[in-house]
Amino acid sequence: MSATLNRGLNALREQIDAPVASFFTSCVSCGLCAEACIFYRATEDPQYTPIRKLDLMRRVWSREFTLLGRIGGMLGLTKPVTDEDLKAWEPLVYDSCTMCGRCTLVCPVGNDITMMIRKMREGMSAAGHAPVELIGAAERHNDLGSPMGELHPALHAQVKNAISETGIEIEFDKPGVDYMVILSAQEIAEFPDVLGAMSKIFKKAGITWTISNDAFEATNVGIQLGNRDVARTLVQRVVDAAEKLGVKGVISPECGHAYQALRWEGPNLIGRPYKFEVIHIIELLDKLRADGRLKTKGKNTQKLTFHDPCQINRRGGINQEPRRLMNMVTENFVETDDAGTMNWCCGGGGGVGANERAATLRSAAFKLKKNQLDKVQPDAIVTMCAYCHHTLDNVLEEFNMEQEVLGLTELVAEYLDDDA
Ligand code: SF4
Ligand code: SF4
């Protein structure tokens, strides 16, 4: 057995705990998770059912952790997982799963299928069977501070632009302020207007904030790749910077998996609670609205709909906050079918968007989102995740759809009441 296969199988074995055993013993093969999965629904290909994606882990569990499986193994009735198996499963585990959580939500026996896929990725990446794009992004993130490489110069340039556009100072590494803001590489590279938007809103609301040069990157490629060590290092970086600055909170930006990683997985990864709160930017804006510290004037008159990012709504619990903000600044807000917790994924999450090999499947999966949009025919789509924004921009163009995509923070800032 090769060293990498051994490492991969050991990583898979390490993931097998009581919830995993309970998963495999309690699954009643009802098929509801298949009907919930965007990739299965778009293709009707049985290999894309969530359960099939987990089959290698089931085999390891059965052969090594159950009496019948062990006996079967000794008698040569069951086959061990091989490197060829891991290679064959790589596209199932990485290309056809955005870790959207829809399957988990419908499982009648409460199996967290999404977390199982996450666990599968730990074994796959340890065995060297992960998309090269994710491996490269994790290396850049670990070594250079961001999945896109060294982003300090770009960040400083975007901050300078925001300062000159708004006339409001943004200070780096300022201790004792209310919040440390982290940003996704996607925002810095593609949607930097969010900086000026936050700056204006926070100034009006009397919030003090800073950006840390040590840890400005919000994303966590370790989670998407399935590498706990990388994921832990990246969370620890943010935690160390926030605790060094003594802020009361860290604002997680418009990025789905960044929120999931820092808010929900982070304390478990580093093995302790944080000394600060983690709040998503949209949660904070809604809180400011409720406290009367965010006041807007006028409303957008276009027909606008809202796309719920899986990691922020379904898996993050932020459901009504964006809707209250949408109603605050829009006159013609329309919901799509399945909006909210059962919304269809944009198709690019969980590292799928970065994975070139998955491009055709990703386009096929978009048809479910497209059906939602075609029914309401909005003028524009608002969202609260820069990666959904990026994915939607690309697929809308690919499908010759004319809608533009807007970030909710920027939309709110546009209607900020300067006189209040
Ligand atoms: S998490 Fe989403 S994409 Fe992945 S298997 Fe479940 S439903 Fe399918
Ligand atoms: S929904 Fe749950 S019980 Fe039904 S097949 Fe999927 S994992 Fe098994």
Image (cartoon, rainbow, N blue to C red):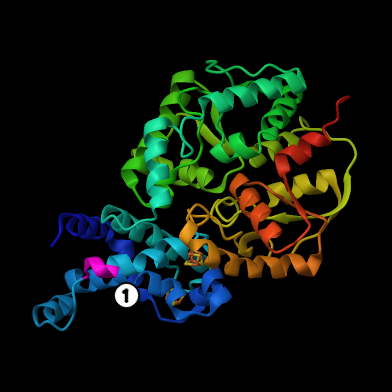
- Residue 323 in the image: above or below residue 190: below
Q: At x 52% / y 17%, what residue is drawn? A: 173
Q: Which residues are magenta?
A: 81-85
| Relative image position of residue 144 (x, y in whole percent) | 41, 31
Is residue 21 among the parts visible in the rendering?
no
Amino acid on which the number 1 mark rests in the picture: Thr
- Residue 68 in the image: above or below residue 304: below
Give the left or right position of residue 190, taking residue 271 as reference. Answer: right
Q: At x 34% / y 61%, what residue is drawn? A: 120
Element type where label 1 sits in the image: helix
Is residue 279 among the parts visible in the rendering?
yes
**Overall secondary structure of the magenta section:** helix
Q: Quadrant of the N terminus?
A: bottom left
| Relative image position of residue 243 (x, y in whole percent) | 44, 24
Does the magenta run of residues contain 187?
no
Q: Quadrant of the C terminus?
A: top right
Q: At x 42% / y 43%, what residue is drawn? A: 137
Residue 29 in which image quadrant: bottom left
Q: How many marks?
A: 1
Q: Nearer the viewer, residue 375 or 265?
A: 375
Residue 337 in which image quadrant: bottom right
Q: Nearer the viewer, residue 399 or 167?
A: 399
Q: Circle 1 is placed at which residue position?
A: 25
